[in-house]
Image: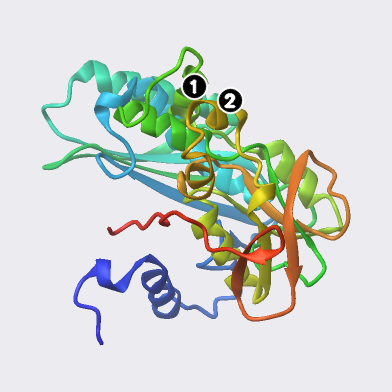
Amino acid sequence: MTPRTVAELGEEALVAQLRVRFATSDPRVVVGIGDDGAVLASDSRPLVLVADAMVEDVHFRLRHGAARDLGHKALAINASDLAAMGAVPVASLLTLSFPGTLPAAWALDFIDGAAEAARHFGAPIIGGDVTGSRGGVSVSVSMLGHPGGVRCLLRSGARAGHGIWVTGTLGLSGLGFELLEGRLASGADAAAAVARHQRGQARLPEGLALAASPGVGAVMDVSDGLLVDAPRLATASQVTLHIDLERLPIDPLVRRLAPDHAEPLALAGGEDYELLFTYDGEPPIDAQRIGTVVAGPARVAWLRDGQPDAPRTRAFAHFD
């Protein structure tokens, strides 16, 4: 049946159509649509380009926190994509769509947060656009970088026998969102979860370390949640991922404040911005092994105690 709406088409199918319709044989395009970023050849060194949009009531709520935090996050999530490519940030472009009724103080606080993040990541904002909006606030950032090693990291490098690893912990940003929404009771130490959700993060040093290591396979950042992102890596590499649910590095605060929701938040909470990667041997960075790559069709086999066990949660979908 032909999809009638974008929701019926779905994000993955839409991206597949973009890849087909925007296909190019231009030799300057080293990596095109389908990875965490694109790579263009240049006379001196390749350019890595990433972009992310943030839309009010899709990615954020104005009532959830300070505009300054949101400005910081808008750049952080782009820096996270560069981290997944093993790249060093160089510069940023910022496009702002604001309704005319938006308080000027909010707009200026957002800009201050973006400027703070640009300095932190070494990616000065050098241009962009400002437009009015008949709806809510919409923000788009494009960030440019250079490969930090001799090659860019891609989603397509996983090979049978590689271990599957993830940096840091999972679920903390999702917990922060649930706390802000009032769906979970807030504890005295909930501020860390809220801060993770409001400001984001980028594992740039870890990405650069992986880029310099010969054992690295495939890499991507965990933005939409492991339940969505792991299958993307499997598809890009055309392998099967065996992931052990009992080995997920669920954040201790998530286990303490939301014990009944810990695994769903770790799998589908999203916006953790950790690195999911495969590696031949022991990686050079601090990470938790969660499974093994095996030869087979492009899919994820979720396991518990060595047995198949479908996750008991629903994956994030952009057009739901």
Residue for badge 2: 120
In the depicted structure, whether residue 239 falls above or below residue 108: below
Is residue 245 in view? yes
Q: Please, is residue 112 above or below residue 60 in the view? A: above
Name the image quarter holding the C terminus.
bottom left
Q: Determine the residue located farthest toward the top in the rendered image.
A: 188
Task: Tell me if mark 2 has few (under 14), some (14-19) or many (20+) residues whose alpha carbon lies within 10 angstroms of its own.
Answer: few
Q: Amino acid at mark 1?
A: Glu
Residue that appears at 38% across and 77% down: 17
Q: Which type of secondary structure does the marked residue at label 2 adopt?
A: helix
**Relative side of 214 to 24, left or right:** right
Mark 2–mark 1 Cα distance, whole angstroms, equals 6 Å
Q: Residues within 10 Å of mark 1 (few under 14, many from 20)?
A: some
Q: Quadrant of the N terminus?
A: bottom left
Q: Nearer the viewer, residue 313 or 212?
A: 313
Tell me the amino acid under the disc marked 2: His
Q: Secondary structure at mark 1?
A: helix
Give the residue drawn at x 11%, y 42%: 134
Q: Is residue 75 visible?
A: no
Residue corresponding to mark 1: 116
Percent x, y of residue 47: 61, 54
Callout 2 touching callout 1 (CB < 8 Å): yes
